[in-house]
Structures are given as structure tokens and as C-alpha cells.
């Protein structure tokens, strides 16, 4: 098994997007917990960390995804004009 056999690359990209869009800040507990899930999975979290992930990280990921989707829709609409 290689070093990245357990890494969730899709989640890694989602976390990176959330940071880039300002929904999640590097160096915060929520960011560290998100990185832990990327590297070790959700089941590696303690109950307190799961609360932070569910109530801070997931909404940040959702917000970044919604922003990304809206930007993509705008690009497509502009292309059709």
C-alpha cells in the first residue's frame, strides 16, 4: 500500500476550493479536522471533532460548492449570449 491509498482526493479538492473561496480558513481547528478526514477518514474523528466537521466544515464545503456552481452557470450563460 502506498502513502495515498487512503487519501480522499475529491474531498481534498473540495477543502482547497473552500479555502480559496474564503469559506474555510487554514490554521483553524475546522481546517485541521477537514485535513484529518482527507487523510484518515471521518471515522478517525473523536465525537467533538465530528461535531465540528458536521457543523463547520460541511457547511463551508457546501457554500464553496454553491459558489462554484453559480460561477459555472454564469460562465455558461455568458457563452450563450
Image: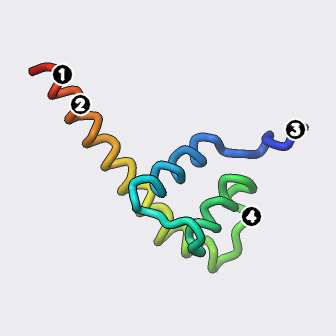
Q: Are marks 2 and 1 in contact (CB under 8 Å)?
A: yes
Which of marks 1 and 4 precedes in the sequence?
Answer: 4
What residue sits right under mark 4 in the picture? 44
Closer to us: 1 or 50: 1
Mark 4 burial class by Cα count in 10 Å: few <14, some 14-19, many 20+:
few
Which of marks 2 and 3 precedes in the sequence?
Answer: 3
Q: Are marks 4 and 3 in contact (CB under 8 Å)?
A: no
What residue sits right under mark 1 in the picture? 79
Q: Quadrant of residue 41?
A: bottom right
Determine whether, in the image, residue 71 is placed left or right of residue 26. Answer: left
Tag 1's secondary structure?
helix
Q: Is residue 62 above or below residue 46?
A: above
Tag 2's secondary structure?
helix
Q: Residue at x 20, y 35 (%)?
A: 74
Percent position of residue 46, x then y: 70, 74
Determine whether, in the image, residue 14 is placed left or right of residue 1. Answer: left
Q: Are marks 3 and 2 in contact (CB under 8 Å)?
A: no
Tag 4's secondary structure?
helix
Percent position of residue 55, x then y: 47, 71
- Image quadrant for the C terminus? top left
What residue sits right under mark 3 in the picture? 2
What residue sits right under mark 2 in the picture? 75
Whole-angstrom CA distance, mark 4 to mark 2, is 39 Å
Q: Residue at x 65, y 77 (%)?
A: 47
Q: Residue furthest right?
A: 1
Mark 3 burial class by Cα count in 10 Å: few <14, some 14-19, many 20+:
few
Q: Nearer the viewer, mark 4 or mark 3?
A: 3
Q: Is residue 21 above or below residue 2?
A: below
Determine whether, in the image, residue 36 is placed left or right of residue 80. Answer: right
Mark 1 burial class by Cα count in 10 Å: few <14, some 14-19, many 20+:
few
Amino acid at each position: 500500500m502506498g502513502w495515498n491509498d487512503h487519501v480522499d482526493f475529491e474531498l481534498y479538492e473540495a477543502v482547497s476550493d473552500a479555502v480559496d473561496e474564503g469559506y474555510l480558513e487554514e490554521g483553524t481547528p475546522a481546517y485541521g479536522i477537514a485535513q484529518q478526514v482527507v487523510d484518515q477518514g471521518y471515522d478517525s474523528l473523536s465525537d467533538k471533532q465530528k461535531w465540528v466537521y458536521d457543523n463547520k466544515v460541511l457547511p463551508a464545503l457546501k457554500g464553496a460548492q454553491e459558489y462554484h456552481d453559480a460561477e459555472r452557470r454564469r460562465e455558461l450563460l455568458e457563452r450563450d449570449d
